[in-house]
Amino acid sequence: MQKITSLFLIVWFSMSISFAQEETNKTSSDSIKILKGRIIDVKDKSPLQSAHIVNLNSVEGIITNSNGYFKIPAQANDTISISYIGYQSIKLKVTNDLLRGNELEIAIHQKTININEVTVKVHNLIGVLEIDAKNVPMDKYSRIHIEGLPQTYEIGRPREKDYTSAAGALFNPVDFWYNKFGKKPKELKKLRKLKEKDELRNMMEEKFSREILMDYMDMSKKELDDLLKECNYSNRFVKKASDLQIIEAVIECYENYKAIQKGTVSKEKVSVNSQEDKN
């Protein structure tokens, strides 16, 4: 009788765990829904095609169709970033009411932009790889794409610095950032997703605002610029690079710094390589 009772308890316990797990999975699955909407101009109500919609929590991205419509997976408390070239970006906090199936109509404002003088240079390309490769200016700070040649840009490494005070060493941006991401690897994983997913990668290639990067890294634009300079990237690269290039630069710097901290790469070797890059 005792054995039967024990067997019954084991079976009951196993079924309870299985049922609880199914309920948890079901609840988690049910909480993820589709957020639907349309992006329009606030003045003339015209639809905005190819506006960028990014779920900052799940790192999912999509662009609007020719009529300005989009659909993106989301759940309550997610933050949706909405941006379009020449328009003011906005962030939308997702609530249960927004996920009830109704289509949202989101109107955004144009930015007031002062256009600087632009100099257009003509490069005579004839379609022959060997000749065109010589005619294109060698600019290591910008991506150059010719079919058959790799896309390249400068590679930075953490600088070696002699600090004259304890405060100077304490507020070193590279140290601060490394320690921050060492404790919060989820943020770094999100940065990696931005450059690994095709849809998001294409978006980041077109962006130059740094907005999404600043959100994930919890940095102001000045702090991000200071970090890149400490990582030995040039002022021109910091100003001209796309958001995708900045993501790759930040991750490159982090990996190099991590290698130095762990002792897998010597500081002397990094210093030598940095000097070679400058030459």
Image (cartoon, rainbow, N blue to C red):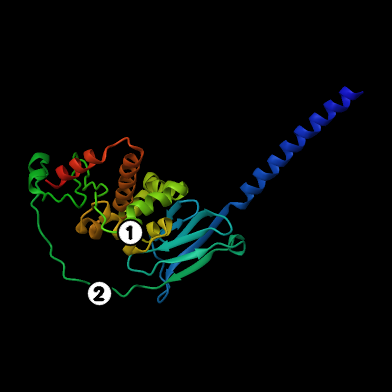
Q: Quadrant of residue 173?
A: bottom left
Residue at the farthest bottom position: 43
Mark 2 vs mark 1, foreground winner is 1
First along the sequence among labels 2 and 1: 2
Mark 2 surroundings within 10 Å by alpha-carbon count, few (fewer than 14), some (14 through 19), many (20 or more): few
Q: Quadrant of the N terminus?
A: top right
Q: Residue at x 38, y 54 (%)?
A: 176
How far, Cα to Cα, is label 2 from label 1? 23 Å
Residue 187 falls left or right of residue 163: right
From the image, tell me which residue sits under label 2. Answer: 114
Q: Residue visible at 33% across and 57% down? A: 166
Badge 1 marks a residue whose secondary structure is helix
Q: How many marks?
A: 2
**Left or right, residue 74 beside residue 136:** right
Q: The residue under label 2 is which amino acid type?
A: Asn
Name the foreground residue: 191 vs 160.
160
Choose between 269 and 44: the one closer to the eye. Answer: 269
Secondary element at tag 2: loop
Q: Is residue 231 positioned above or below 266 on the image? A: below
Q: Which residue is mark 1?
A: 224
Percent position (x, y) of residue 184?
A: 47, 49
262, above or below 159, in the image? above
Identity, as a three-letter code, of the amino acid under mark 1: Leu
Left or right: residue 67 compared with residue 135 = right
Q: Residue furthest front?
A: 165
Image-quadrant location for residue 17: top right
Is residue 68 visible to us here? no
Q: Residues within 10 Å of mark 1 (few under 14, many from 20)?
A: many
What x and y, as percent, mark residue 226?
29, 59
Q: Which residue is pictured at 10% across the width and 59% down the height?
A: 121
**Against 272, is 224 above or below?**
below
